[in-house]
Amino acid sequence: MTYPPPAGGLGLIARKSRVEFAGAFYHVIAGGNRRAVLFHVDTDYAAYLQRFERYCQRDRLRCYAYVLMANHVHLLVETGGALLFRTIQQV
């Protein structure tokens, strides 16, 4: 049975917390609020990658693959020791 979304709400359900441990692989999808555009020009993409690389080195993440799209990113990362969600939030 499906229920209509609450009045004034989007009807979204929070996802379960991610279990994290060093050496685990994660497919991360991160995007702008309400699917807003993140990257407007080529230099935005380059700046994101530079910032992401700096945080990966700091937090010992290994990135195996990435896709940067105008309104979101996909990352395949292996964790080192830091909490993944904190790294992604800071990028």
Image (cartoon, rainbow, N blue to C red):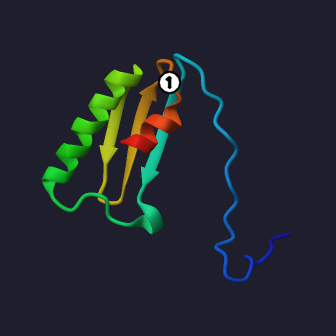
Task: Indicate the secondary structure of the residue bearing disc 1.
Answer: loop
Q: Is residue 43 above or below residue 18?
A: below
Q: Quadrant of the N terminus?
A: bottom right
At 44% from the left and 49% from the top, the residue drawn is 30
In percent of width and height, residue 41 lies at 16, 59
Quarter of the image with the C terminus in it: top left
Residue at image position (31%, 59%) is: 38
Q: Is residue 61 visible?
A: no
Outermost right residue = 1
Q: In the image, 8: left or right of 41?
A: right
Quickly name the residue at label 1.
82
Q: Residue at x 35, y 23 (%)?
A: 58
Total number of numbered labels? 1
Q: Is residue 85 visible?
A: yes
Of 26 and 39, the residue lying toward us: 39
Relative image position of residue 28 (x, y in whole percent): 47, 40
Percent of width and height locating residue 20: 61, 27
Q: Is residue 63 left or right of residue 40?
A: right
**Type of residue at label 1?**
Ala
Q: Position of residue 18 (x, y in %)?
A: 64, 36
Crowding around mark 1 (Cα neighbors within 10 Å: few <14, some 14 to 19, many 20+) is some
Q: Nearer the viewer, residue 34 or 1?
A: 34
What residue appears at the point 32 percent right and 64 percent down from the top-left corner? 37
User: Which residue is most to the bottom?
Assistant: 7
Left or right: 2 in relation to 76: right
In this rendering, is residue 70 above or below 84? below
